Image (cartoon, rainbow, N blue to C red):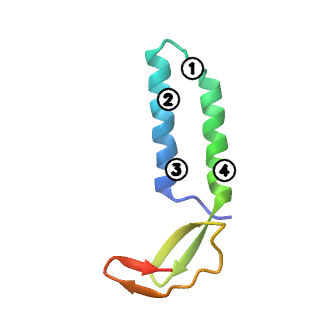
Amino acid sequence: MHRSPSWLLKSFEVELDLRLAFSQAFCDAVDLTYLAQHFRMSKLAANSQFYTVEVGDSTFTVLKRYQNLKPIGSGAQGIVW
């Protein structure tokens, strides 16, 4: 089982933090139970949509729809697939 990259999980956490702040500002106008459930489902969806590929000393997290990737070049800015 592959783990989601930490930056992806952190972006979900930031989104959840913003929603919690919004709900607190509007006196529980947003159901926190719904937000927590949505957050858990989002993390699961993210895990199932990505896989990791190691090329040399770099590890990439790629959407599953991109399969059989082959590096065709590299330079100062990175790798071209």
Q: How far apart are marks 4 and 3 (CA)?
A: 11 Å
Q: Earlier in the sequence, mark 2 or mark 3?
A: 3
For badge 2, the amino acid type reads Arg
Q: Residues within 10 Å of mark 1 (few under 14, many from 20)?
A: some
Task: Give x and y (percent) for residue 61.
Answer: 54, 67
The residue tagged with tag 2: helix, strand or loop?
A: helix
Q: Which of marks 2 and 4 is nearer the N terminus?
A: 2
Q: How far apart are marks 1 and 3 (CA)?
A: 22 Å
Give me the disc on residue 16.
Answer: none
Q: Which of marks 1 and 3 is nearer the N terminus?
A: 3
From the image, tell me which residue sits under label 1: 30
For badge 4, the amino acid type reads Ala
Q: Distance between the residues labelled 4 and 1?
A: 22 Å
From the image, tell me which residue sits under label 4: 45
Is residue 17 shown left or right of residue 38?
Answer: left
Q: Nearer the viewer, mark 2 or mark 3?
A: 2
From the image, tell me which residue sits under label 2: 19
Q: Nearer the viewer, mark 4 or mark 3?
A: 4
Q: Which of marks 4 and 3 is nearer the N terminus?
A: 3
Q: Which of marks 1 and 2 is nearer the N terminus?
A: 2
* Residue reaching furthest to the bottom: 72
From the image, tell me which residue sits under label 3: 9
Q: Do the residues labelled 1 and 2 touch (CB within 8 Å)?
A: yes
Residue 18 sits above or below residue 57 on the image: above
Q: Which residue shows up at 55% across the image and 15% down it?
A: 29
For badge 1, the amino acid type reads Val
For badge 3, the amino acid type reads Leu
Image quarter hosting the N terminus: bottom right
